[in-house]
Image (cartoon, rainbow, N blue to C red):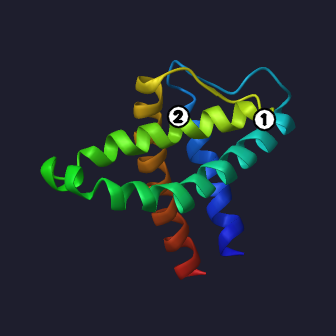
């Protein structure tokens, strides 16, 4: 159940990132957009689970030299990759360049963080 909730929270965070020019969800019905968001959240989650640890290991010197700011670039590139892979498998989700991906990844991270805090508070009170 926790995995499903995490995917749904990430889908909401990806949806919020579509306010950035250059991140587009395409023209479709609302159910189709929700399905696309869930699938993009799965793609983004898989990329973060598989590729991000490898990049962190290989780029640990850059993380240290930039005091962690390199992580913002890595997150942007991974979000851009998620957009590319989503398009490649036929999902109508497009990230048009590095800067939209950079800002979109920041929005996804902040939104996901806030949603996780809210979810934890709601489940703790219940």
Residue ID for mark 2: 80
Residue at 81% from the left image edge and 43% from the top image edge: 35
Against 1, residue 28 (above or below) is above
Residue 12: where, in percent of width, then height? 62, 47
Against 14, residue 49 (above or below) is below
Residue 67: where, in percent of width, then height? 15, 52
The mark total stands at 2
The quadrant where residue 96 appears: top right
How many C-alpha atoms fall within 10 Å of the one at disc 1: few (<14), some, or many (≥20)? Answer: some
Which quadrant would the N terminus be assigned to in this image?
A: bottom right
Residue at 78% from the left image edge and 20% from the top image edge: 27
Residue at 20% from the left image edge and 55% from the top image edge: 61
Q: Taking 10 as reference, is 29 left or right?
A: right
Against 108, residue 21 (above or below) is above
Residue at 26% from the left image edge and 58% from the top image edge: 60
Q: Which mark is residue 33?
A: 1
Q: Earlier in the sequence, mark 1 or mark 2?
A: 1
Residue 71: where, in percent of width, then height? 31, 48
Instruction: For mark 2, give the secondary structure.
Output: helix
- The Cα–Cα distance between marks 1 and 2, rounded to whole angstroms, is 19 Å
Which quadrant would the C terminus be assigned to in this image?
A: bottom right
Q: Which mark is residue 93?
A: none
How many C-alpha atoms fall within 10 Å of the one at disc 2: few (<14), some, or many (≥20)? Answer: many
Q: Taking 88 as reference, is 117 left or right?
A: left
Residue found at the far front of this picture: 58
Along the line of sight, the residue nearer the viewer: 43 or 125: 43
- Tags 1 and 2 touching, CB below 8 Å: no
The quadrant where residue 113 appears: bottom left
């Amino acid at each position: 159940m926790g995995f499903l909730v995490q995917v749904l929270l990430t889908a909401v965070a990806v949806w919020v990132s579509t306010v950035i020019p250059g991140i587009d969800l395409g023209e479709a019905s609302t159910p189709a957009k929700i399905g696309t968001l869930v699938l993009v959240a799965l793609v983004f989650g898989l990329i973060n689970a598989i590729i991000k640890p490898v990049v962190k290991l290989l780029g640990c010197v850059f993380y240290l030299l930039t005091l962690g700011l390199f992580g913002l670039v890595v997150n942007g590139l991974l979000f851009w990759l998620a957009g590319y892979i989503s398009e490649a498998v036929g999902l109508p989700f497009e990230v048009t360049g590095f800067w939209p991906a950079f800002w979109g990844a920041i929005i996804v991270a902040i939104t996901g963080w806030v949603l996780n805090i809210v979810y934890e508070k709601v489940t703790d009170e219940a």
